[in-house]
Image (tube, rainbow, N blue to C red):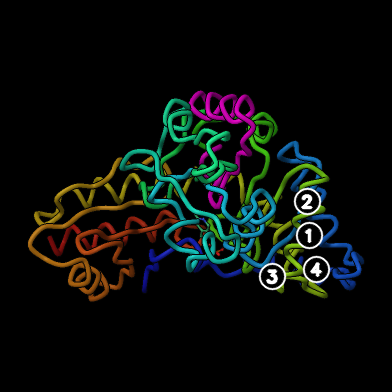
Amino acid sequence: MTIDLRSDTVTLPTPAMREAMFRAELGDDVFGEDPEVNALQEEAARMMGKEAALFCSSGTQTNQVAIAAHTHPGDEVICSPLSHIYLYEGGGTMANSGVSVRFVGNARGMFTADDVAAAINDPDNAHLPLSRLVSVEDTVNKGGGAVWDPEALKAISATCRERGLALHCDGARLFNALAVTGMDPQAYGALFDSISLCLSKGLGAPVGSVLLGSREFIRSAHRIRKRFGGGMRQAGFLAAAGRYALGHHVHRLAEDHNHAKRMAEALAQLPWVREVMPVQTNIVIFSVDGHSAAECVKWFADRGILCFPFGPDKVRMVFHLGVNSSMTEEAIRRIIIAA
Ligand SMILES: *Cc1c(COP(=O)(O)O)cnc(C)c1O
């Protein structure tokens, strides 16, 4: 049996999710007539306490639409150098919106309200790009699935409001973060002007993300999604999977976190594992000594465990609804025996 820990995007729809997709009522969403898409957007917005939502093809699309909706060419976005919007969206932040990025934060992708305040350019100095947007990633993928402290987010939100900047959350794994902090989703939603929420990561839907914000913001995002080629027609098949995921797969995320912690303990026993980043959610990142990340990935693959090189000397494993407790224990057994 192969245990696939490369990403939480490798999940396949469960039989019950497929049933929900099969039964989806459909219409043309470009005409606003797909009942499943409309229901998903309403439910997701209500869940996070936002006025409106927009179903998009991917987390990259929700982030890119949000950045374009918040900024004008020549503006600047303040974010971590580890952020997905900078590293993994094909240069889209710069190419699609014509904005520059200003880096803040530490090795886990976190920063403070003071860091933000110090990075905001003087709006009266015409030499400088206009600081327009701050983007936070929660959980931080490159930071080993690190979860933001709600107090830090509240302080950043207050600074953004005071200084007139918009605040975006790349919440690809937002519900993993909420499972740890226990923060109320609507209180969380109130901190941000926009939130991108992936349905196809730990929540287990095959495709899709939702962008959340005010009615006015989503109106503008809707036009930009169309411009980016993101108007989908009978998208209700996919929205039905997303609705099922929001209704049934949020509550089980803590299981993935337990599996990740069990794995981290086992990995720490391998002599060539230098350091395992602290595990808070479903992601385990570890650095290796004496072998390249690619060699280590091969070592695991030879034992039927798939993982992902995450830099020259780092490897990532991600837990998800396709890996249950007995599969986790089996993976650990194979690792310990081989060690
Ligand atoms: C996966 C991910 C996204 C979106 O990725 P898509 O593959 O485009 O859906 C955005 N941000 C983070 C932090 C992610 O991990």
Query: Which quadrant would the C terminus be assigned to in this image?
Result: bottom left
Name the residue type under label 4: Gly
Q: How many marks?
A: 4
Counting other residues with Cα less than 10 Å from the Cα at mark 2, is it few (<14), some (14-19), or many (20 or more)? many
In the image, is residue 28 above or below residue 60? below
Mark 4: give few (<14), some (14-19) or many (20+) Cα within 10 Å. many
Residue drawn at point x = 78 percent, y = 42 percent: 214
Badge number at residue 218: 2
- Of the pair 105 and 145, the residue shown nearer to us: 105
Residue denoted by label 4: 236
Q: Is mark 4 within 8 Å of ligand 1?
A: no
Q: Secondary structure at mark 3?
A: loop
Question: Which residue is identified by label 1?
Answer: 222
Residue nearer the viewer, 48 or 108: 108
Disc with the residue nearer the chain's start (2 vs 4):
2
CA separation in Å, label 3 and label 4: 20 Å
Residue range (magenta): 151-178
Q: How many neighbours does mark 3 have within 10 angstroms: few (below 14), some (14-19), or many (20 or more)?
A: few
Q: Is residue 106 magenta?
A: no
> How far apart are the alpha carbons under marks 3 and 1?
10 Å
Residue at left 53%, top 24%?
A: 155
- Residue carrying label 3: 228
